[in-house]
Amino acid sequence: MRNWFPNCRQGFPLAMVAAAACSIAGCMSYGETVVYQLYQTNADRCAQNETDACVAMLQSSCEAPVRVCTDYVPEFQAQASKQLSQKCQANDEAACQALDAVACNNGDYAVCARLGDAYAKLYASCKAGSAADCESLSLSVWPKKQTDLANIACKSGNTIACRVVSSSASAMKVNVNRDAQFAMF
């Protein structure tokens, strides 16, 4: 009988080696790969001085497959924290404010109060016509509580709040359906 799959016989050992390597090294499922790439993209953006991406990494709540959450996300968050800390120590105001926003989101009342005061002052100055303060208000990274309040004000027609909402960073929450069946590769 003629062999209909002549290449399969030669490829079989290679497939066995690949399968063994995956079982030892732990290849990622499709779902894990997608989630990993989302985090990697933000980590890369963070490294490129995009403060909002660093904040997103620090504020991420991982609802991805467990292995991604335990193996990779802490590493990405540590990288983002280090990046922001280094920039803040080098007197980068945006990085310091981003760290403050994360601290406030994590429950630091004193930092929240300070940021609330800063927001109120910039808002009042912007409303009074200061273009520079309007720009500063919209380009700054604010805590979730502040952006939530700005979102409510925006829905009521407040254009200043809409600028804050449209440009502010929000926490990235990666959601992957844990019941979904992803092909392994």
Image (spheres, rainbow, N blue to C red):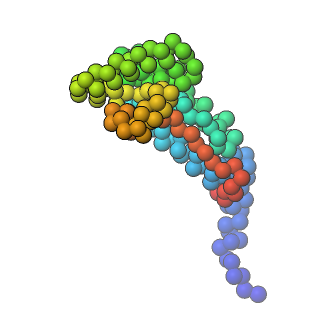
**Residue visible at 72% across and 86% down?**
2
Check the image and name the residue furthest to the bottom: 1
From the viewer's side, name the closer residue of 21 and 65: 65
x, y percentage for residue 106? 57, 22
**For residue 51, what is the image quadrant?**
top left
Q: Which quadrant of the figure contains the C terminus?
A: bottom right
> Is residue 10 positioned above or below 171 on the image?
below
**For residue 14, what is the image quadrant?**
bottom right
The answer to whether residue 2 is visible is yes
x, y percentage for residue 46? 44, 33
The answer to whether residue 46 is visible is no
Is 74 displayed left or right of 25 in the figure? Answer: left
From the viewer's side, name the closer residue of 125 and 96: 125
From the viewer's side, name the closer residue of 15 and 117: 117
From the viewer's side, name the closer residue of 100 and 126: 126
**Residue visible at 57% across and 39% down?**
173
> Is residue 1 positioned above or below 104 on the image?
below
Is 123 displayed left or right of 23 in the figure? Answer: left
**Residue visible at 47% across and 23% down?**
101
Is 158 displayed left or right of 4 in the figure? Answer: left
**For residue 116, what is the image quadrant?**
top left
Q: How many marks?
A: 0
Check the image and name the residue furthest to the right: 1
Check the image and name the residue furthest to the top: 110
x, y percentage for residue 20? 73, 52
Q: Which quadrant of the figure contains the N terminus?
A: bottom right
**Residue visible at 68% across and 78% down?**
5
